[in-house]
Amino acid sequence: MLHDKVVREPARFEEQRPFIQMLKAKVAYATGRRNVDETFRSLLCRVVDQTVDVETLRQARLFMEAFMAYYKVYRSSEA
């Protein structure tokens, strides 16, 4: 969703940056509730920290989409 807002108007990246950074707070909350583990929290925080412009936001989105797709496939095979 954040990516879509910025892609249409790249000048809005700075306006959306606080919402991108808020993902770190959301994953910290999810970690505290034991919905995700520390490894995932660390990964997401690193991805967010490296998101500095429209292009890196696009790359972050693609990376996380691929990560989640593989996670769902391999996690379901462990059950």
Image (tube, rainbow, N blue to C red):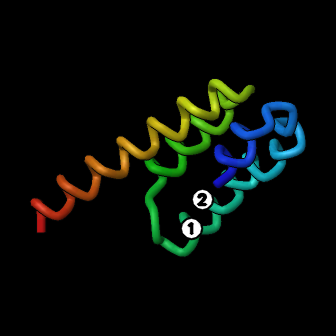
Q: Mark 2 points at which residue?
A: 27
Q: In this view, does 14 lie above or below 2?
A: above
Q: Is mark 1 on a helix, strand or loop?
A: helix
**In this view, 25 is above or below 63:** below
**Residue 37 picture quarter:** bottom left
Q: Is residue 41 above or below residue 48?
A: below
For the point 30% across and 50% down, which residue is it? 69
Quick one: 59 or 40, which is closer to the camera? 59
The quarter of the rendered structure image containing the C terminus is bottom left
Instruction: Tell which of 56 and 43 is nearer to you.
Output: 56
- Element under disc 2: helix
Neighbor class of circle 2 (other Cα within 10 Å; few <14, some 14-19, many 20+) is many
In the rendered image, residue 32, in percent from the top left (x then y), is placed at 58, 69
Quadrant in which residue 8 is drawn: top right
- Residue 17 is tagged as none
Separation of residues labelled 2 and 1 (CA atoms): 5 Å
Residue projecting furthest to the front? 8
Camera-side residue: 47 or 6? 6
- For the N terminus, give its image quadrant: bottom right
Camera-side residue: 2 or 26?
A: 2
Residue 71's x, y, as percent? Answer: 28, 52
Q: Are discs 2 and 1 less than 8 Å apart at CB?
A: yes
Residue in the image at 69% along x and 37% along y: 7
Q: Name the residue type under label 1.
A: Ala
Q: Where is residue 61 in the image (x, y as percent from the top left)?
A: 53, 40
> Residue 31 location, x and y as percent?
54, 64
Q: What residue type is labelled 2?
A: Val
Which quadrant of the figure has residue 29?
A: bottom right
Write down the residue under mark 1. 30
